[in-house]
Image: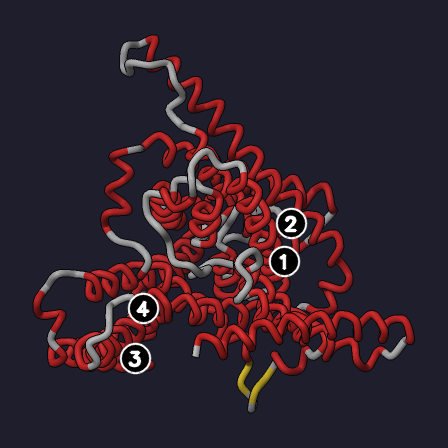
Amino acid sequence: MRQVIQQIQRQAMYFAVACVVGLIACITTGWDQAYGPLAVMIGVYAALGFSGCGGLKQFTFTMWVLAGVTAAMFYPSWFGTWGGFELTLLIVPLTQVIMFGMGTTLSLRDFCRVAASPWPVMIGAGLQYLIMPLTGYALVRAFGFEGDLAVGVILIGACSGGVASNLMTYLAGGNVALSVTMTCISTFISPLLTPTMMKLLAGAYVEVDFVRMMLSIFNIIIVPVVVGLIAHSLLYGRLPAMRRAGVLWSLGIACGIVAYVASWPAAASLGIWATLRSGIIVGLVMLGVVAAAKAVISVAMGRSNDWMDRALPFVSMAGICAILAIITAQTRNVLLAVGLSLIAAAVIHNTVGYVLGYWCSRVIGGVLGRLGYAMGLVQSPASLIGETDCRTVAFEVGMQNGGMATGLAMDVLHSTIAALPPNVFGTWMNISGSLLANWWSRRSQRPISQSIVEPSDALNGEF
């Protein structure tokens, strides 16, 4: 089976090259009817081929994203309405599923690491919520973005870090445990800091309801992540009851019943509960699915528990590609009008995050180290933040949670235009993160395999 897959991957690379040649020929001859099919096939075949090529494997997800976005640009009607159902209604629940997947990669131990190394976490979170929103606001002014487009640029900068930074940190030889911890902390403080920065910086472009945005973050991000944490405890915990098929099936059925009751129209009038309802419903459904899957795969079939680490990343990646394609199709005309400016803003925003994240953490760590030594608090004037930690902070500051920004744009602002910048910025972040991780890994002071913990091998929850 493995040989068959490898053969398909090799042939996909040949097909990708053939499609590139064909697209060049069509452009030369002016046969524009073939542009769309060939462009989409290039992305699909390249994604399949890259998945079997060691040096290019980390770009597999990016190629799937590009394939989806390309399809949406050439065939926007495919991603508009299906049978009278507006596909934009899927964006918030898909984001919640992605956040659930993020939660399953975490454990309470990740939060306990803050006590062991608080300075990098505090500095990183501070830089993230200071540098990126201000940079987004500066780019809005510099490029002359207006209205919802301006709000979207500021919004992606005001969001927390994403799980993709954990993977990039791992590939770069950084401190993965610190990366995971920073992602946790920035996510759980986002209900306060994201609405605050939006109120201060985006208030001139659109009315920002602080409380509504805060509750929306709880609904879209915090609730699914917390339920994902519970799912992680169920799957990897040591409770004997969680190894019994009857208990797991009962839990799955109970989650389904509660989710069904929560979906009743009468539940929509219960104050704050109504605001958090969709997050609770999606979380309960996913928790029930995980419990039932464990009963079948781990208990009945006797398979290892790592199936969730392999399955949920693919679910998350499919959700991310779907969200990007839907938003791209809805905002195609705007993207064609301001695409180059938006891409330029994305490159600058992301680069500023990497550069200032790295150097500010290095300078601040050095200053704190010397102050601590002068005050007798530490035994050495060495920096409190080492090289690998600086790289980690760079990724955490430079890479935002595009899913969170997209969900907020749709749930709070009700604007596909505001969701466009997170899509463009998120796509670029995955490309630049892969390139920077490759470059740093070649110059790493220690092998990647010596990282403290190894994250999932897919972009489980961020775009």
Between 55 and 186, the one nearer to me in the picture: 55
Q: Contact (CB < 8 A) between labels 2 and 1? A: yes
Q: Earlier in the sequence, mark 4 or mark 1?
A: 4
Between 272 and 401, the one nearer to me in the picture: 401
Q: Residue at x 60, y 45 (%)?
A: 350
Q: Tell me which corner region of the image, top left, top right, bottom left or bottom right, holds residue 163.
A: bottom left
- The amino acid type, in three-letter code, at marker 2 is Ala
Q: Nearer the viewer, mark 4 or mark 1?
A: 4
Q: CA gap, disc 4 to disc 3? A: 34 Å
Q: Earlier in the sequence, mark 4 or mark 3?
A: 3
Q: Nearer the viewer, mark 2 or mark 4?
A: 4
Name the residue tied to disc 1.
Answer: 424
Q: Position of residue 187 (x, y in %)?
A: 38, 50
- The amino acid type, in three-letter code, at marker 1 is Val
Name the residue tied to disc 4.
Answer: 308
Q: Position of residue 191 (x, y in %)?
A: 39, 50
Name the residue tied to disc 2.
Answer: 346
Q: Nearer the viewer, mark 1 or mark 3?
A: 1
Identify the element where label 4 is drawn.
Answer: helix
Q: CA gap, disc 2 to disc 4? A: 33 Å
Q: Is residue 240 above or below residue 146?
A: below
Q: Earlier in the sequence, mark 1 or mark 3?
A: 3
Residue 227 falls left or right of residue 437 = left
- The amino acid type, in three-letter code, at marker 4 is Met
Q: Residue at x 27, y 40 (%)?
A: 113
- The amino acid type, in three-letter code, at marker 3 is Ala
Between 43 and 396, the one nearer to me in the picture: 43
Q: Position of residue 457 (x, y in %)?
A: 42, 59
Between 337 and 349, the one nearer to me in the picture: 349
